[in-house]
Amino acid sequence: MNPRPRKIKLLRWLPRRLMLTTGPAKDNGLYLSFDDGPHPGHTEAILDLLAANDARASFFVLGEQAERHPELMRRIAAEGHLLGNHSYDHPSFPRIPIAEQMSQIERTDQLIAAFDGRQRHLFRPPSGRFSIGLLLRFAFERRRMAYWSYDSLDYRRVPAERLVETMRRHPPAAGDIVLMHDDNEATTQALAMLLPEWRAAGFSLRILPV
C-alpha cells in the first residue's frame, strides 16, 4: 500500500489559494482529516482519542449526516475541531452537472453554518474526484478545495494492525494532511496506537488553515 500516490504529488502544482494539499510544517504541524461522517459510535470514539492526546483535526462531513446527527456536529465544533464540506450525499461529482455539484456544496455549507457560524467551508470532493469545470468555478468564486498529501488507506477496510504497519513503515511528515474516515472501527483502533506515537515524535496535531 502506498500512502503517497502520484496523483497527490501532481496536485501540489496547483495554487495554494485554490487547492490545499499540505498544511504549514512549522513546529511539526500534522493535520488529521476525517471524511464521510459524522457516524454515531465511531465519531465519538475518535473525538475521545483526540481529546486524550491534546489533538485537533478537521472533519469533512456529509450534509445528510449532519442533518441526522446534530449532536455530533455540535460536539465536533465545541471541542475546537474544524468542520469541512464533503458534499451532501457523496455522489460522483464528475458524473453530475456543475449546477448540481454547486447545489450539493452550497446546501451543505448552509447546514454546517448552523454549527460553526461560517458561511463558507473548505471543500473536499467525494472520493477526491473533481472536474476541471469545478476547479474553474472555484477559481472564479475564490473558493478553496482541501485535498491531502498522505492517504491512510483506511477505506480499504483492512485490519487496524495492517494500517498501523503501513503508517509506521511510511510515516507522515510535518505539514502532511492525513486522509482518514470516521466510519469504521479499524481507524479508531489504529489511531489509539498511533496518536501517542505521533505526539511523542513531536508532532503538533492541528486543524487545517482556512
Image: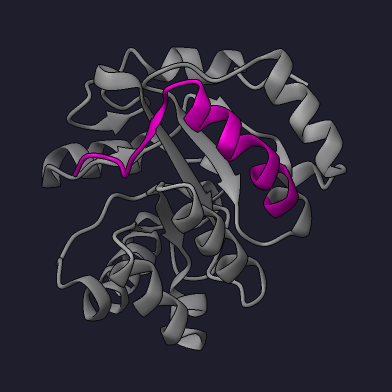
Q: In this view, does 127 lie above or below 64?
A: above
Q: How is the image coloured?
A: one colour
Report x, y in % for residue 66: 44, 78
Q: Is residue 79 above or below residue 64?
A: above
- Residue 110 included in the magenta stretch of the image: no
Would residue 14 be found to the left or right of residue 104 on screen?
Answer: left
Q: Residue 109 appears in which quarter of the rendering?
A: bottom left
Would residue 181 be found to the left or right of residue 106 on screen?
Answer: right
> How many numbered markers are drawn?
0
Q: Residue 59 appears in which quarter of the rendering?
A: bottom left
Q: Residue 41 appears in which quarter of the rendering?
A: bottom right
The region drawn magenta spans 188-210
Would residue 151 be found to the left or right of residue 210 on screen?
Answer: right
- Residue 204 included in the magenta stretch of the image: yes
Report x, y in % for residue 12: 37, 16
Report x, y in % for residue 73: 40, 75
